[in-house]
Image (tube, rainbow, N blue to C red):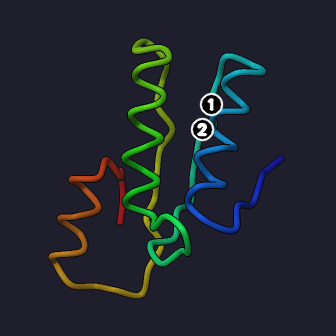
């Protein structure tokens, strides 16, 4: 099973709803960088913050940044946002 969000805010809401309902989170999140409302970096920061505040012992999802940008600055920013792979 998987969920598909249209933007970063919706992705965060999916994570929140899953945690509130099942006290767990996704194993893997494929996060696009360029999304409306809230980009992938912002969404990742908010997801990590929410999960850490909700349950610091919860295993965090593996978050992969999907983008056509290949510059090192984007890779560094993805890592700083809390993404596991770029």
Residue 8 location, quadrant? bottom right
What residue is rendered at 50% in x and 17% in y? Answer: 54
Look at the numbered discs 1 and 2 and tell me whether their residues touch, using CB distance below 8 Å.
yes
Q: Is residue 61 above or below residue 72?
A: above
The image's mark for residue 25 is 1
Q: Which of 68 and 5 is in front in this view?
A: 5
Q: Is residue 1 left or right of residue 74?
A: right
Q: Is residue 45 left or right of residue 6?
A: left
Vertical position of residue 44 compared to residue 33: above or below: above
43 shown above or below 27: below
Q: Residue 10: give x, y in percent of width and height.
A: 66, 55
Which residue lies at the image location 65% right of the left edge and 22% below the top edge?
24
Image depth: mark 1 or mark 2 in front: 1
Where is residue 80 drawn, in percent x and y? 21, 53
Where does the image place residue 41, in percent across and percent down from the top left?
A: 37, 60
Quadrant occupied by the C terminus: bottom left
Instruction: Check the image and name the residue furthest to the right.
Output: 1
> Quarter-wise, where is residue 27 in the image?
top right
Q: Nearer the viewer, residue 85 or 79?
A: 79
**At 24% from the left edge and 55% from the top edge, which residue is drawn?**
79
Please provide percent x and percent y for residue 58. 49, 18
Mark 2 neighbour density, 10 Å: few (under 14) some (14–19) many (20 or more): few
- The residue sitting at 48% across, 23% down in the picture is 59
| Secondary element type, mark 1 | loop
* Residue 14 vertical placement versus 29 (above, below): above
Q: Is mark 2 on a helix, strand or loop?
A: loop
Q: Distance between the residues labelled 1 and 2?
A: 7 Å
Q: Name the residue under label 2.
A: 27
**Horizontal arrangement in the rendering, residue 5 relative to residue 63 (left or right):** right
């Amino acid at each position: 099973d998987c969920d598909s969000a249209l933007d970063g805010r919706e992705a965060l809401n999916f994570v929140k709803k899953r945690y509130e309902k099942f006290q767990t989170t996704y194993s893997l999140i494929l996060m696009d960088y360029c999304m409306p409302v809230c980009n992938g970096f912002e969404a990742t920061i908010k997801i990590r913050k929410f999960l850490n505040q909700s349950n610091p012992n919860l295993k965090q999802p593996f978050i992969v940044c999907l983008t056509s940008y290949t510059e090192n600055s984007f890779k560094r920013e993805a890592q700083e946002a809390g993404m596991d792979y770029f």
